[in-house]
């Protein structure tokens, strides 16, 4: 998980609740009924929007969001250099003994087809189909997070309206109007906090994660197809290096460094 996610959540909660505790009446902000209405109402709205099978993906989406990490792309440049040298010297079938050492399932998927002698065009189509299926599944979390982020403030406002209606129906004691107004506004506060500190930022971060995954998968696809075509190791590495940013390129080991390693 990226440190910025934890740092942002921690800083946001510290600033918001630090300001609350520095003032008076902080206990008003911890209203179970308001929290239940915002979270439960947003969840109910999700059930209207999506099927139960789709909602079952929510726990997995959270887990994948917080555990998401990718190896540096420079690692693939070095790995494809080695794989292409083996294929050049000994043929594609020689890659079969390296498959068990490969952790990336997408790279392994492509190389297995290469070893089996499948045509380059069919390998490309299969890898693109596999990639699209994976991206669709991982991108669905963006919809889930965005929907919850949109529902939370709406139910916060609904809670506020409920509180105001109840308060207006009982104006016999003017001294209670201020306290009743404060409680009524807590749901709006919670809805905005949950949406803007958690779920909407989660959705935006997930978009970046999916984009990073797409870059990695496209680099792997390009490398596998180059090996199948029989391109030279130096040409493959140069082609893959064109897909890296300058900062990523600085992490790629030179041929001399690779031999020393």
Image (cartoon, rainbow, N blue to C red):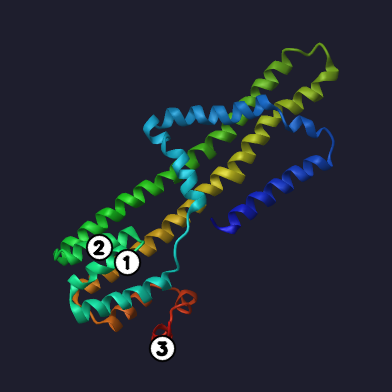
Labels 3, 1: front one: 3
Which residue lies most toward the top here?
Answer: 172
- Badge 1 marks a residue whose secondary structure is helix
Q: Is 165 in front, or is 140?
A: 140
Number of disc labels: 3
Q: Which mark is residue 58?
A: none
Q: CA distance from mark 3 to mark 2?
A: 28 Å
Q: Position of residue 10 (x, y in %)?
A: 67, 50
Disc 1 crowd rating (10 Å Cα; few below 14, some 14-19, many 20+) is many
Task: Estimate the spatial distance between the alpha carbons at disc 3 and disc 1, rounded to whole Å.
Answer: 23 Å
Dividing the picture into quadrants, the one containing residue 113 is bottom left
In the depicted structure, whether residue 8 falls above or below residue 102: above
Q: Quadrant of residue 174?
A: top right
Of residues 219 and 160, which is closer to you in this image? 219
Q: Is residue 206 above or below residue 39?
A: below
**For numbered disc 2, what is the local secondary structure?**
helix
Q: Position of residue 30 (x, y in %)?
A: 72, 31
Compared with residue 81, is residue 138 higher up or lower down, i.e. above or below? Answer: above
Q: Circle 2 sits on which residue? A: 110
- Who is closer to the viewer here, 238 or 171? 238
Q: Is residue 162 among what the camera can see?
A: yes
Alpha carbon separation for disc pair 1 and 2:
8 Å
User: Would you say residue 51 is visible in this rendering?
Assistant: no
Picture quadrant where residue 127 is located: bottom left
| Residue position for label 1 | 220
Q: Which label lies toward us, 3 or 2?
A: 3
Report the side of 58 relative to 18 (left or right).
left
Q: In this figure, which residue is indicated by the disc labeled 3?
A: 256
Q: Which numbered disc flags the more N-terminal residue, 3 or 1?
A: 1
- Residue shown at 38% from the left, 64% from the top: 216
Instruction: Give the residue displayed 43% in from the left and 61% down from the top.
Output: 212
Few, some or many residues within 10 Å of mark 2 (<14, 14–19, 20+): many
């Amino acid at each position: 998980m990226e440190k910025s996610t934890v740092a942002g959540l921690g800083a946001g909660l510290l600033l918001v609740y630090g300001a609350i505790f520095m003032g008076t009446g902080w206990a008003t902000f911890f209203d179970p009924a308001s929290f239940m209405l915002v979270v439960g109402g947003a969840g109910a709205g999700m059930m209207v929007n999506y099927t139960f099978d789709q909602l079952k993906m929510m726990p997995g989406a959270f887990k994948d969001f917080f555990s998401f990490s990718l190896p540096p792309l420079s690692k693939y440049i070095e790995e494809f250099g080695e794989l292409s040298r083996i294929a050049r010297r000994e043929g594609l079938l020689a890659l079969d003994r390296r498959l068990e050492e490969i952790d990336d399932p997408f790279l392994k998927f492509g190389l297995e087809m290469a070893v089996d002698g499948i045509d380059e065009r069919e390998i490309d189509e299969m890898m693109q189909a596999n990639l699209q299926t994976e991206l669709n599944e991982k991108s669905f979390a963006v919809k889930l997070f965005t929907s919850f982020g949109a529902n939370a403030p709406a139910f916060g406002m609904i809670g506020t309206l409920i509180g105001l209606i109840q308060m207006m129906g009982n104006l016999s004691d003017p001294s209670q109007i201020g306290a009743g107004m404060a409680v009524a506004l807590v749901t709006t506060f919670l809805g905005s906090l949950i949406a803007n500190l958690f779920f909407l930022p989660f959705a935006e971060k997930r978009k970046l994660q999916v984009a990073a995954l797409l870059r990695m998968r496209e680099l792997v696809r390009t490398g596998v197809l180059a090996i199948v075509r029989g391109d030279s190791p130096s040409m493959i590495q140069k082609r893959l290096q064109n897909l890296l940013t300058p900062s990523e390129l600085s992490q790629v080991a030179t041929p001399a460094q690779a031999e020393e390693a």
